[in-house]
Image (cartoon, rainbow, N blue to C red):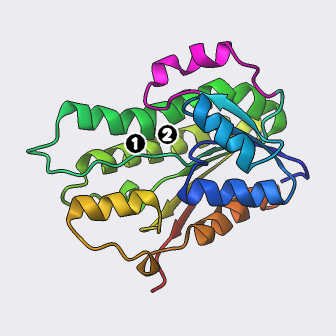
Amino acid sequence: MAPMATHMITGAGSGIGAAVARRLHERGDDLVLLARDAGRAKEFAERYPGARSLVGDLANPDRLSWAFSHQQLPDRVDSLLHIAGVVDLGEVGELTTKAWRGQLEVNLIAPAELTRLFLPQLRVSQGHVLFVNSGAGLTAHANWSAYAASKHGLKALADALRAEEHGNGVRVTSVYPGRTASPMQAKVHQQEGKEYDAARWIDPESVATAILTALDLPRDAEIKDLTVRPGR
């Protein structure tokens, strides 16, 4: 990745996204952070001096294009990092259409729409689209149907995008972290009725290291799929 690259990041508020944003900010790269509202944008401005925010709600991907049409988009985007995600566990026999739709909108349809909106800049820069997927994007366990379906779909999106944009020089990576110590993981444990011990799971900094490795790989190579598992 060239010095002073510009990265568009979702999910920079916590967990893996916050670790990635901090690392890229510290090394002097330019950040454009997606904020769900003006309050979160203000928080980002204080946490990452010099970074820009775009306000748009991933839970309402139909409105993203409209929201961006009222804001100034970055002229250059070297990487689009899809890190935001939501999870809502439940058995197939119990999950509502609202639970299904909520996870599909944020975890799959919004990344597809954001990718569509930023592809012109990514083609010019011969940039990188990176999807933080999940172990659930490869295997679906009981109670994980809707979340896993959204992440299986995200794998399909990445694979199709890679095939479509390879000739344009756009690299596409899917990262599949196992359970990572984050607010999302705390919520999962709460839904599972289990005690949460962050020390048992992957440190977000370790996943951030894997993501930066994929971004910084020389142009003669491309990491297509990267699985990161707990080492304990």
Horizontal side, residue 46 vs residue 75: left or right? left
Q: Identify the residue position indicated by label 2 in the image.
A: 157
Among the 4 quarters of the image, the one containing residue 122: top right
Q: Position of residue 138 (x, y in %)?
A: 38, 58
Q: What is the x, y in percent for residue 95?
A: 16, 41
Residue denoted by label 1: 153
- Give how far across and how far down residue 140 sits, in percent: 27, 57
Numbered tag placed on residue 219 in the rendering = none
Looking at the picture, which amino acid does disc 1 mark? Gly
Q: In the depicted view, which residue is nearer to us: 64 or 109? A: 64
Tell me the residue at 59%/42% (across/down): 10
Q: Whole-Å distance between the Cαs marked 1 and 2?
A: 6 Å
The crowding category of the residue bearing disc 1, from other C-alpha atoms within 10 Å (few below 14, some 14 to 19, many at least 20), is: some
Q: Which residues are magenta?
A: 56-74
Quadrant occupied by the N terminus: bottom right
Q: Quadrant of residue 26?
A: bottom right
Helix, strand or loop under label 2:
helix
Q: Are marks 1 and 2 in contact (CB under 8 Å)?
A: yes
Task: Check residue 57 for magenta coloring.
Answer: yes
